[in-house]
Image (cartoon, rainbow, N blue to C red):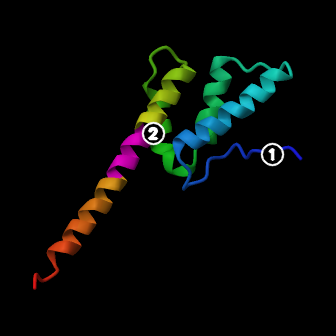
Amino acid sequence: MKKLYNLKMKEDASVVEHSNAFNIITNQLSSVKIILDDEIRTILLMCSMSDSWENLIVAMSTSTTTGSLKFDDVSSSLMNEGLRHKSITENQGGEALALADRGKRMD
């Protein structure tokens, strides 16, 4: 049985995983001669992001001076923000451990 993909990103999913799943879907479509142009792919990618990405999506949508966004630009921005978020989350975890260690007595 073929695996079906859900186009909507889960809140706890990584951007890389979501992007890979998205690309698999668009590649499968193109293999059956359904070609999505750059603008449609961009809109679909932006709409497929989870609700927590709404502010970035709106900011990207309104920041364009040409009236259209490029898929590669949007994808890169989402990846960069995903990496930034992951880095912040990992650093917060390390800071919490450091604070917990500070509270321990040295015997």
Q: Is residue 69 visible?
A: no
Judged left or right of residue 79, residue 68 is right
Dominant secondary structure of the residues highlighted in magenta in the image: helix
Residue 41 on image: x %, y %: 66, 26
Crowd around label 2: few <14 · some 14–19 · many ≥20 (10 Å): some
Residue in the image at 66% along x and 31% along y = 23
> Looking at the image, which is closer to me, 65 or 38?
38
Image position of 78 with respect to 9: above or below:
above
Task: Read off the residue under disc 1.
Answer: 3
Give the percent coordinates (x, y) of residue 97. 26, 68
Residue sitting at x 81%, y 45%? 3
Query: Is residue 84 in the magenta section?
Result: yes
Q: Position of residue 54 (x, y in %)?
A: 51, 44
Quarter of the image for residue 63 reads top left
Q: Which mark is residue 56?
A: 2
The foreground one among 74 and 62 is 74
Which of disc 2 and disc 1 is earlier in sequence?
1
Amino acid tagged 2: Leu
Name the mark on residue 62: none
Q: Nearer the viewer, residue 53 or 3?
A: 3
The Cα–Cα distance between marks 1 and 2, rounded to whole angstroms, is 30 Å
Q: Amino acid at mark 1?
A: Lys
Q: Residue furthest bottom?
A: 107
Foreground residue among 64 and 22 = 22
Q: Residue at x 56, y 54 (%)?
A: 11
Classify mark 2: helix, strand or loop.
helix
Residue 36 lies, with reference to residue 20, above or below; the image says above
Residue at the farthest front position: 107
Q: Against 75, is 12 above or below?
A: below
Using the image, determine if residue 102 lies above or below residue 93.
Answer: below
What span is colored magenta in the figure? 81-88
